[in-house]
Every structure is written in C-alpha cells, then in structure tokens.
Image (cartoon, grey):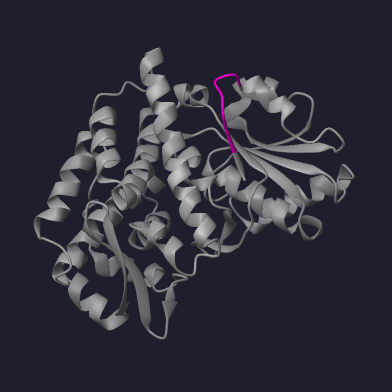
Amino acid sequence: MTLYTNKDINQIQKLPPEDCNVFAIIDNKVKDYFSAFKNWNIFSLSASENAKSLKTATAVYSWLMENKADRNCFILGAGGGVTTDLAAFVASTYKRGVKFALVPTTLLAAADAAIGGKNGVNHLGVKNMIGTITQPEWVFQSPVFFRTLDRRIFREGIAEILKTFLIFSPDLYGFAVSFFSGYNSVNPSDKEEKILGRIVKECARLKMEVVKKDEKDRGERMVLNLGHTFGHALESWASENRKKILHGEAVTAGIVLSAKVSSALGLCEKFLASELAEDFGKVGLPSSFGVRVPQIFNPLQQDKKISSDSICLILPKGLGDVVRFRIPIPDLKKICSRLSI
C-alpha cells in the first residue's frame, strides 16, 4: 500500500489507473470537495453507523451492477471511517474482489480506519461483525479535509493518534498531547497544519509497520486494539440506549478502563489510569461516561477476540509498553464489577 500526502486534493484525479472505470463511494458530507471526483461515477450516502450495514452494501452492489462495473473497475471510498470501511468491504467482495483506494476525510479515518486493510459492516448491533482484511492500493491524506470538521469529530481522531503513540512512542505521545491541547482545528495556521500533516503521516506509518508484520491480526498487530474491546462494547451499549458516543471517545474511555484493569492485575502502577485521563482531558476527550462496566458485558461477550470463555485484552503497562493478556470472562467480570467506563 502506498501512502500519499498532499494539500492539493485535485491530485487524486491522477492516481487511479487510466485504463479502468472508477466508481467513487462518497459521504455526502464531503460534497464541497466533489470536484476532486467529478470525472467518475459517484454513489453518495449519508454515512452513519446504521448505514454501515449489509443493506447499504447491497445497494452499492446493485449500483455497480447497473453501471456495468466489471472486474477491472477501480473503487474509491471517500469520507470518514464508516464510508472507507464500507467501500473497502464492497470492493473486497464485489466479483470476488476488485482494486480500490481510500481518501479519508476525517482525522479519525486518516489516522486509523483507512490504514491497515480492516473493513466491514455492523450486524445485529455488533460493530464490524462481517468483513475482510484487504489492503487498498493507496491511501490519500490531506489536512485540507480536516478544516471543516466539527470540533468533536476532529477530537475523536486525536484519540486514535494518541492511542498509536501511546503504544509505540512515549516521545511522540507527549508531543501530540502538548500540540493538540492548543490546536485550533477551525482556523489553524499554515505551520500548525503542516505539523498536523506530519503527525497523521507518522501515526499511519507506525500502524503500517505493525500491519506488515501481522496483516491478519493474529499476533503483534493485536496491540492496536488497545481501548477498542471495551470501547466497541460501550458503543454498542450507547446505540441500544440511544446515547451519542463517538468512536474516538469510546476508545479513550476504553483505554482508561484498560489501565484500571491492568492495575488490578498488577501489570501497571495505579496512577497510570488517572495520568492518561488527565492527558485526554487536556485535548478535550472524555475518560469516562459513568456507565457501569457490567452494563456493557452483553455486547462485550460478542467480541471476536473471545475464545473458550476467555478474552484477549490489550493492557497498558506504561507509556510505550502494552501487553496481550488473556483473561477468563468470570475473572474479568469480578475485576470490573465496581468499575465504570
């Protein structure tokens, strides 16, 4: 996979192969940038977790067939994580797989969702239950897209960046906390935007390195799930209870809860959870929603990482140091019985 970074979004036009038809699946929130995709067939959608479904995928399959998309076609997914996940899933399954690329237009998608080849749709209220791991031909990143993001949407991308740096680089983690605590996402300076571009690119590079070593998520790549096991369960609970919790927000709360569990198991110092919560607060991210952990155990027990009544958690031992830890579900329930997320 090739990673392109450019402030000129019209450069996207030059990247697909010249000898194929391009079909772009685009979140209609990106309509201000549709000119960058004007020469191609466009399927626009209102992206949401509810739209990330087999029903929507079926509608896209039908559109492709109606427009005579063959096995040599090229699919482009442009939007946030919902759109890039959906487009990649459709491309990896349409006619048993066609080539595709992704243009993430949110900070969250650029830092995480569009990198690594994981794609899929939700099913029966469970996130990413159906999908594949298929790499795009390329990913195009541009900080220009981030200028129009709502502050809350922008901040959830910060969560994935901090998570990645927390796993791999204490120095970059500290730098990112300091940078984002004073960053004006609505009206950034040219210098700030250049630094942001470098941060996003470095985050993507670190993720790509571990993906190369373990593409199918059977070993080393699993560390990237830090905060996600609890976070996904919280998102599912929120959806069932009609609460609005964004993915990045759920991840930060999940990371703090992971630190609490790690401390209870004697794997890290007790102060780590509060230290992480303080850092997340500096950049405007929540560290807890006050939901009792037993309330999220039903969706948690649908997690793909559960095997033989135990689950593999990624737990922090310190900055730049995380560990895979398999724990029996009854033991985890006991530890979490009085904890909140």
Q: Is residue 211 inside the magenta stretch?
A: no
Relative to 7, residue 232 above or below: below
Q: Residue at x 55, y 46 (%)?
A: 82
Q: Residue at x 90, y 45 (%)?
A: 68
Residue 329 image offset from top left, x and y in percent: 31, 80
Relative to 248, residue 259 above or below: below
Q: Quadrant of the C terminus?
A: bottom left
Residue 156, by quadrant, is: top left
Residue ranking furthest to the right: 68
Q: Nearer the viewer, residue 337 or 311?
A: 311
Residue 285 image offset from top left, x and y in percent: 27, 40
Q: Residue at x 84, y 37 (%)?
A: 21
Q: Is residue 231 left or right of residue 148?
A: left
Q: How many marks?
A: 0
Can residue 246 be seen here? no
Q: Is residue 6 inside the magenta stretch?
A: yes
Q: Residue at x 59, y 44 (%)?
A: 84
User: What residue span does the magenta drawing correspond to?
Assistant: 3-8
Q: Is residue 136 left or right of residue 247?
A: right
Can residue 303 be seen here? yes
Relative to 182, residue 160 above or below: below
Residue 142 image offset from top left, x and y in percent: 53, 27
Residue 280, by quadrant, is: top left
Residue 334, by quadrant, is: bottom left
Residue 163 image offset from top left, x and y in percent: 33, 48
